[in-house]
Amino acid sequence: MSKKIVVIPGDGIGREITAAAVVVLKKIAVKFDLDLSYEYYDAGGTAYDKYGTPLPDETVAAAKASDGVLFGAVGGDQWDNVKPSLRPEKAILGLRKSLGLYANLRPVKVSDALREYSPLKPELVQGVDLLIVRELIGGIYFGDRCESEMYEGTERAWDLENYSVPEVERIARLAFDAARARRSKVASVDKANVLATSRLWRRTVTKVAETYPDVSLEHLYVDNCAMQLALRPTQFDVICTGNLFGDILSDEASMVCGSIGLLPSASMGGKVGIYEPIHGSAPDIAGQGIANPIATILSAAMMLRYAFGESEAADAIESAVKTALAKGYRTKDIAAFNAVEVCSTSEIGDVIAGFIKK
């Protein structure tokens, strides 16, 4: 069956890393006899410069008509002074909203070959295998806001956080379902000692847990969870949390494995998902050929698994990445430990593709 992939490189290193991922996808398509086609569209600052908007209507329409979206990254210093409603970051937020994607899945695994690269002691990170399930289209990122107003003689700004029971229920169910397929443990993260939305979150997750008697549930305050990720990350199976906390915790978790360039993500919940690395557009290294595309390649594997039902093909990509790292192939960001050969962005993509057996 033919599958249409919309590739949205975005800004900065986006074009380089998505190109490497497409090389790997093309190799996997040959091995598994998959009919994959690719269409390219703009978003972010690149789109703003061309069309005056970070998310053109044609990009949204193409994404809706596709079977999966492979997304690079958006943003850059040159758009810092653009008015907030037109900033590059609005592209990914708007696309998630347009596609009805309410959940972001961010797996964190530590490769044996890179245990020494973690800022934590190797014995603390050995065996780390956790999944962060982040609510994606609610919370403070999508609430009402005021950029500036005068109040009692001084300027202030504000953002409003809110969650509804149905929003929390659906993300909780997804987290519990994911845990059932893993090690049957969910850690729900909130700030219920301070925030009203977090108290609703905790009540609702607790109620959902009653329908999953085979899955254990614990509640953690977000500050404690952040500490526990550094102290004993192996204790976690599935972490379920809101948009803001999930954004922060997933970046912290990325450093458990040593580089933000290694972690993929999948945004799901609607008919079409978005598969993207968790890192940003890194404009400071754009065009130099030194960006790490592994997170994007692994995001492509998640697309094969979740969007196309091609788990064997996804396993083959993940195995090829593991083999490349075990044999000492590195990009510049992870070259400090056990590097046998330091590769450019395109070279590491070719290396990984080469480890996919015909």
Image (tube, rainbow, N blue to C red):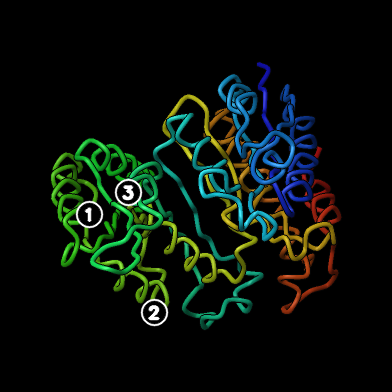
As drawn, 29 above or below 276: above
Q: Earlier in the sequence, mark 3 or mark 2?
A: 3
Instruction: Residue 308: give x, y in percent of width and height.
Output: 58, 28
Tag 3's secondary structure?
helix
Residue 67 is left or right of residue 226, and the answer is: right
Q: Amino acid at mark 2?
A: Leu
Farthest residue, direction front? 153
- Report, in whole angstroms, how far the alpha carbon at label 1 lies from the one at label 3: 25 Å
Please name whichever residue, 217 or 83, is drawn nearer the observer in this view of the structure: 83
**Label 3: which residue?**
139
10 Å neighbourhood of mark 2: few (<14), some, or many (≥20)? some
Instruction: Residue 343: give x, y in percent of width and height.
Output: 84, 63
Q: Quadrant of residue 226?
A: bottom left
x 29%, y 44%: residue: 176
Instruction: Residue 121: give x, y in percent of width and height.
Output: 52, 83
Q: Amino acid at mark 1?
A: Ser
Please name whichever residue, 161 or 322, is drawn nearer the observer in this view of the structure: 161
Whether tag 1 and tag 3 are in contact, CB under 8 A, the answer is no
- Residue 216 got which mark? 1
Q: Earlier in the sequence, mark 2 or mark 1?
A: 1
Please name whichever residue, 292 or 80, is drawn nearer the observer in this view of the structure: 80
Instruction: Residue 124: give x, y in percent of width and height.
Output: 46, 78
As drawn, 246 above or below 39: below
10 Å neighbourhood of mark 1: few (<14), some, or many (≥20)? some
Q: Earlier in the sequence, mark 1 or mark 3?
A: 3
- Residue 21 got which mark? none
Q: Quadrant of residue 118?
A: bottom right
Please name whichever residue, 60 or 324, is drawn nearer the observer in this view of the structure: 60
x 52%, y 71%: residue: 256
Residue 25 is left or right of residue 196, and the answer is: right
